[in-house]
Image (spheres, helix red, strand yellow):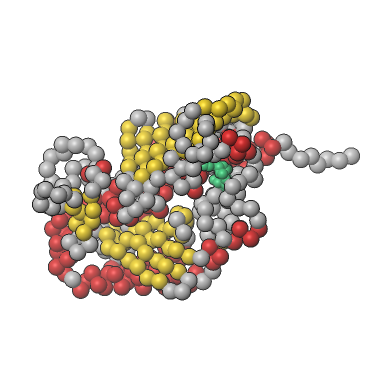
C-alpha cells in the first residue's frame, strides 16, 4: 500500500516558514524587500509589540494587479524569474516565491494594493494561509501588507521568541541594513506609535548613515572606492578613532543585498592594518557591485549568504580601498583636526526631537567635511545637531 502523500499546500508553506521566518524581524525583512523590488521610493514599517502583535509595511511601489493578488499567496509564484537562465542573473532581492505564502500560513494576513493602470485595487484577507475575503477597494497605488498574530498556529515557535526588547532590536537591525543598502528610498520605522528611525531617501549614502547612526558618526566616516574588471567597491568607513566593541556596525552589500560574509569582514579589518585596537571594530558600509553571474544568491533560505566567484580578488580590492583611503587621510592632518573639532563642539540644548535630516535640503560638502543646509538668503551654516543618537544595532 502506498505510504507517500503529497502534503497540502498550506502545510508545505508552514514547513517552508520554519526555515524562512525565524522571528518577526524575518517578516519585516521579506515584506520590505518586496517593497524595494516593487520600485518604491517610500517605505513605512509600523510594528506593535515588537511585531508579534502586528507588522504593517506600506509602500508606494508598483502594486499588485487584481488577478495576481491571490496568486502571490501561492508557493513558488513569483513575478521575478521565469526561467532557469534567470536564476543566474538575479537583480531583485526576492526570486523564490515563498516569502508571502510562508508568512501568510502562520499569521492573519491582509493585503491592500493597487496598480496605476487598473481602476480599482484589491483587499485580500487570509488566516493561516486560507483566503477569507477578496474584494475590490479604492486604495492608493502601492501595497500595504498587515501581518497580525504571527506564529498564532505554531505555538512552539512562539515560545521560542526572546524578550520584546530583543525582537525589537532585530527589527531595528534589519531596517537599518536595508536603509543603508537603499539610500534612494525614504524609510520610516514606527514602534508602538513612536518613530524609531527615519532616512531621507535622497540617494546619498552618507545621509542615510547620518539618519541611522547619527550625524557625528557620519562626519567621522571617510569615503572608499576601488574597482577592477569584475567588481566595483564603494562606501564609507569610520576613522580608526571611531570604533565599536563588535562587528554589528559593519554592513556589506552586494548588488543592494545585505549579506553576511566572514572573509569579506576580515578583508575590511585587514584594510585597517594595525590602526585598530585589539577587540575593536569599525563602522563600515561597503557597497559591492558585481555581475550577478559571479554571485550565487541561491545558497541560503534567508538569502543572506552569497557565494562569490573570485572572492580572493574581491577581498584584496576591499582591503586596498580601505588602506588607501586611510593613508590619504593621514596625509591631510588639517582635515582630521577639523573633523575632530567639529565632532566635539558643544551643542545647544535640544529644542526639537527629530534629526535635522528631515530638512530635505541638507547636503554634505566633501571639501569641508561637514553638513550644510541649502539656503538662498542666509549664509550657509554647518548643521547644528539636536538629537544625536547611536541607535543600538543589537
Ligand atoms: N510590496 C509588493 N509590491 C508589489 N508586488 C509585491 C509586493 N509584495 C509581493 N509582491 C508580489 O508577490 C510575489 C510573491 O512575493 P514573495 O515575496 O512571496 O516572492 P518573491 O519576492 O518573488 O520571492 P522570495 O520568496 O524570494 O521573496 C512577488 O513576486 C511580487 O510579484
Ligand atoms: Mg519576496
Q: Is residue 223 left or right of residue 253?
A: left
Q: Is residue 44 above or below residue 366?
A: above
Ligand 2, what quadrant?
top right
Q: Is 8 on the left or on the right of 215, as rendered?
A: right
Position in image of residue 107 (x %, y %): 56, 31
The answer to whether residue 393 is seen in the rendering is no
Residue 255, percent from left and from top? 46, 59
Residue located 59% across and 56% down the image: 298
Say if 240 sits above or below 137 in the image.
below
- Within the image, what quadrant is residue 134 found in? top right
Q: Nearer the viewer, residue 213 or 254?
A: 254
| Residue found at x 13% / y 58% | 341
Residue 319 vertical placement versus 378 (above, below): below
Which residue occupies the foreground of this view, 122 or 133? 122
Q: In the rendering, at what x and y percent does residue 29 appear? A: 48, 44
Locate residue 387 relative to residue 245 in the image: left or right: left
Q: Residue furthest right?
A: 1
At 73% from the left and 38% from the top, the residue drawn is 7
The quarter of the image holding the N terminus is top right
Instruction: Decide if residue 196 is on the left or right side of residue 156.
Output: left
Tell me which residue sits at (52%, 32%) in the image. Answer: 119
Q: Position of residue 337 (x, y in %)?
A: 14, 64
Count of labels in the image: 0
Is residue 198 among what the camera can see? yes
Amino acid at each position: 500500500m502506498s505510504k507517500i502523500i503529497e502534503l497540502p499546500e498550506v502545510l508545505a508553506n508552514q514547513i517552508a516558514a520554519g526555515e524562512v521566518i525565524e522571528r518577526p524581524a524575518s517578516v519585516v525583512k521579506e515584506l520590505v524587500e518586496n517593497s524595494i523590488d516593487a520600485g518604491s521610493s517610500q517605505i513605512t514599517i509600523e510594528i506593535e509589540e515588537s511585531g508579534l502583535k502586528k507588522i504593517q509595511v506600506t509602500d508606494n511601489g508598483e502594486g499588485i494587479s487584481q488577478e495576481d493578488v491571490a496568486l502571490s499567496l501561492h508557493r513558488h509564484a513569483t513575478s521575478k524569474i521565469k526561467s532557469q537562465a534567470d536564476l543566474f542573473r538575479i537583480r531583485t532581492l526576492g526570486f523564490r516565491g515563498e516569502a508571502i505564502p510562508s508568512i501568510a500560513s502562520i499569521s492573519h494576513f491582509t493585503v491592500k494594493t493597487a496598480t496605476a493602470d487598473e481602476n480599482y485595487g484589491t483587499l485580500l484577507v487570509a488566516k493561516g494561509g486560507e483566503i477569507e475575503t477578496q474584494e475590490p477597494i479604492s486604495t492608493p497605488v502601492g501595497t500595504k501588507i498587515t501581518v497580525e498574530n504571527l506564529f498564532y498556529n505554531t505555538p512552539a515557535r512562539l515560545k521560542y521568541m526572546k524578550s520584546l526588547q530583543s525582537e525589537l532590536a532585530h527589527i531595528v537591525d534589519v531596517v537599518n541594513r536595508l536603509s543603508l543598502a537603499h539610500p534612494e528610498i525614504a524609510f520610516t520605522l514606527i514602534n508602538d506609535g513612536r518613530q524609531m528611525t527615519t532616512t531621507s531617501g535622497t540617494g546619498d549614502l552618507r545621509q542615510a548613515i547620518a539618519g541611522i547612526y547619527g550625524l557625528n558618526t557620519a562626519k567621522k566616516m571617510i569615503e572608499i572606492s576601488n574597482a577592477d574588471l569584475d567588481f566595483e567597491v564603494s562606501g564609507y568607513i569610520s576613522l580608526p578613532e571611531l570604533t565599536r566593541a563588535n562587528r554589528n556596525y559593519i554592513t556589506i552589500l552586494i548588488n543592494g543585498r545585505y549579506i553576511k560574509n566572514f572573509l569579506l569582514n576580515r578583508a575590511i579589518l585587514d584594510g585597517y592594518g594595525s590602526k585598530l585596537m585589539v577587540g575593536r571594530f569599525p563602522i563600515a558600509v561597503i557597497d559591492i557591485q558585481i555581475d550577478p553571474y559571479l554571485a550565487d544568491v541561491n545558497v541560503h533560505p534567508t538569502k543572506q549568504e552569497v557565494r562569490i566567484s573570485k572572492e580572493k580578488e574581491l577581498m584584496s580590492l576591499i582591503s586596498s580601498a580601505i588602506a588607501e583611503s586611510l593613508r590619504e587621510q593621514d596625509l591631510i592632518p588639517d582635515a582630521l583636526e577639523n573633523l575632530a573639532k567639529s565632532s566635539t563642539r558643544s551643542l545647544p540644548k535640544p529644542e526639537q526631537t527629530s534629526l535635522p535630516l528631515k530638512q530635505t535640503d541638507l547636503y554634505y560638502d566633501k571639501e569641508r567635511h561637514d553638513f550644510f543646509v541649502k539656503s538662498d538668503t542666509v549664509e550657509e551654516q554647518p548643521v547644528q545637531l539636536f538629537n544625536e543618537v547611536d541607535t543600538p544595532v543589537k
